[in-house]
Amino acid sequence: MKPSLFLSAWLLLVVSTTMIITTAKADHKIPTTFSAGQVASVGGLDCLGLVSDYDGASDGIIRLFLTCLTDEYQLLGVPQVDSNWIQGKIATGDLKSGETRLRFPLGTLVNDYMLDQEPILLNVESEVITTDYHGRVLQDQRQLTSARKIGTYSLAIIRVSSDGAGKRTTPTTATLQTEVLSTGDVNVRTQFSACSFNQFNLEPATGNGLDGGVATVATTVQPGSGNIDNGTSYQQFLAYINDILDQLFDQNGARNPADFVMLCLPPSTMSGTDAIGYFNSYLTVYNSNVCTYVSFGIHEIGHNLDLHHASDTLFTPRNNAEYADQVGYMGFSYGNIHAPQMCFNAAKSYQLGWYSSKTYTCTPSQCNPCQVDIGGIVSFDDANVDWVLMKIEDISSGEDYYLTYNNATGINQGTQEGANQVIINTQPREGLERDFSYLVGLLNAGEGETFTNFNGVPNGEISVEVLSIANGVASLQVSTAGGDCAVPTSGPTSGPTSGPTSMPTVGPEDPQVGGDPHFVTWTKEHYEFHGQCDLVMVKDPTFANATGLNVHIRTKLVRFWSYIKNVGIRIGNDVLEIQGNPEHSEAKYWINYEYQGELKTLGGFPISYHASSVSKSVYEIDLDSVYPNAKIVVKIYKEFVRVKLHGGKQAYGNTVGLLGDYETGKTFARDGVTVLNDFVQLGNEWQVLPGFEPKLFHALEKPQFPEKCLEPENPQGDRQRRLTESNISLEEAEAACASQLKDPLAIQDCIYDILATQDLDMVGAF
Ligand SMILES: *[C@@H]1O[C@H](CO)[C@@H](O)[C@H](O)[C@H]1NC(C)=O
Ligand SMILES: *[C@@H]1O[C@H](CO)[C@@H](O)[C@H](O)[C@H]1NC(C)=O
Ligand SMILES: *[C@@H]1O[C@H](CO)[C@@H](O)[C@H](O)[C@H]1NC(C)=O
Ligand SMILES: *[C@@H]1O[C@H](CO)[C@@H](O)[C@H](O)[C@H]1NC(C)=O
């Protein structure tokens, strides 16, 4: 069955470390713990700096919070510093979340868990510090970082039996023991052990107040609205979770009840998110039932292990992209208790270090391809399998490639994407830091993918080829293109410089238009046009010896933005139309206006199709017979369509349209002379002209020229508004959809769309 997709959490944040500062003696008597409503003047306070990155926003604006984790494990807010301050300190290297100590000067007030001063940042990497500002000995707790990814650790789950809002956590102690902590089913405990091949194990914590790993706590504190983007609510939220954590910690003399703590709050206590994980730390927080969902638990504890999200910007528009690599647990999370059963994508698998003994690392050089056979992660303990993970190092950028064979059996039988395909991720900084990974390829046997700008060489390419997949092993070859060992470009080349030593005629970066019409011109300029109409992406009557090429896109407005819902491609006498499909996995297509007709070639060029997950599929038109390595790729994610043109100047040098001039990137009007820098004007200029341009869509939809493109109302203002309103919880979405729909699949799609768009009205679209 299809699990529902839930946007899991903005996550965030941070913490932990081994170093602290010595110095100074206790010259003031200071409180060591704080309580709700308390105002205390502190004579200097040291704590660990945690930066929280508020995810879930789609405007590209980064909103960061700095939190002070005291040595008593209380979380204090630092409202005096804003995102700009935090970003600046991160940029200069002065602030590293979870490593940098914060020192608050004499006279700092703690007012209901909020500090009223700007901190001094202490980075003392070389010192081993055992005492704090006041000479008190520091307790060594939860300060592991990389060491934490391997070993056996205790896990405590806290549930709330009543709170100041009169609510309680839904799952009972017995439910949490059975569903989350037992050894009998797929859950956080069993699946971490399975994926790590027993290198990372979580055992139920024992000790005062814990019953089979579960603690029950009552609080009288009001949780507030749960929207931490709002200062007042943030303060209330901190008071609330500090009160709950304090109670458990107080029952444990060392204030160290467990290595990892899952805090299960009453339903909808947090808004705008259903779960939070603190980076490089011990704490994860959930709304009620979400606590029992295996994918949420592993995703959030993954943040504790310093993993960031698994993203996919190739397929996926807008705020879905951040979580859209569904190969493993750092992408979307799902509302099922014991499913899906899977592990981590290639990049996260590398970062976890569990498979290092079977990781093959190489950098292909001119004339020296890398070749290796890799088994699935599931075969890690198979003595006949030498390698399960491949890393291709890009020496110049540190943005490396990670490959696994995603064998969808056993512990990985529930992978949500790329089942039994070779997965290619990229992740920067050697794959060891808290970074997003990106899904950049999904390959079957016999398929290949080419990446540009390898090793910082302009036009430097690497090609990954899957030679075969058999008996659970994928045979891979990675080679560089261009340069001395490259095969000279075949086929008729014109011009004086053809021959083995000429530069390959690779054009600028592949231009594209995304699901969200976000255009990238031939010279890589990005712009957005949000009108609704049929548009000329590119056209060139001289393409392939006058066979001719037209690519039209049809956009649709949704409130204040738009997305591409259809693409029409003509080559020669053939016309292919592809349309996304919100209801099912399969996109719809028309070949020469015939619905789902036989799909083999377009103007003589072969067409291929494959689905990589329930919601994503890819169509490729292979232009190689005329233009080596060139292809037109259409990617579908639900109802969203994305079009990418791979290949160089030979293929696309004469095109005109929304992508601008091939050489200069100038966004010309139809006269080829006037440059239009107003993108609304440009969009309207390239509206399809019936009669003048061919008909590529089987059905006419409004508006058609001379009616103008429909414009969104006040796009900026509305977009801003949407963000500040982003507070719809999973449970609210579930309730809204379930009240109006009967079909479980429709309900799940509805929930997904509401969370993706933060628009409860989306329920009306079903
Ligand atoms: C912030 O939250 C508080 C209480 O939760 C509320 O009274 C206030 O209006 C909110 N402020 C904004 C700007 O939304
Ligand atoms: C997955 O791995 C198993 C070995 O654990 C192997 O027998 C099986 O053929 C593989 N499946 C696929 C589809 O490669
Ligand atoms: C283009 O057409 C000309 C004349 O018909 C022919 O000689 C040439 O081989 C064709 N080129 C390609 C790439 O098909
Ligand atoms: C966000 O929460 C506030 C207060 O609970 C509510 O009035 C508002 O309608 C919510 N926004 C959305 C989009 O649900």
Image (spheres, helix red, strand yellow):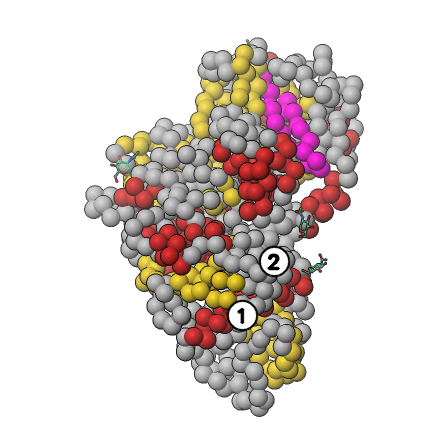
591 vs 530: above or below: above
| Magenta region, residue range | 552-572
Residues 505 and 677: in front is 677
Q: Which mark is residue 226?
A: 2
Dominant secondary-structure state across the stretch colored magenta: strand
Q: Residue at x 53, y 81 (%)?
A: 32
Residues 428 and 15: in front is 15
- What count of labels does the image hold? 2
Farthest residue to the left: give it: 383
- Amino acid beneath label 1: Asp
Q: Name the residue under label 1.
A: 243
Residue 268 in sight here? yes
746 vs 159: above or below: above
- Amino acid beneath label 2: Gly
Residue 507 in sight here? no
Res. 533 image quadrant:
top right
Residues packed near mark 2 inside 10 Å, few (<14), some (14 to 19) or many (20 plus): many
Residues packed near mark 1 inside 10 Å, few (<14), some (14 to 19) or many (20 plus): many
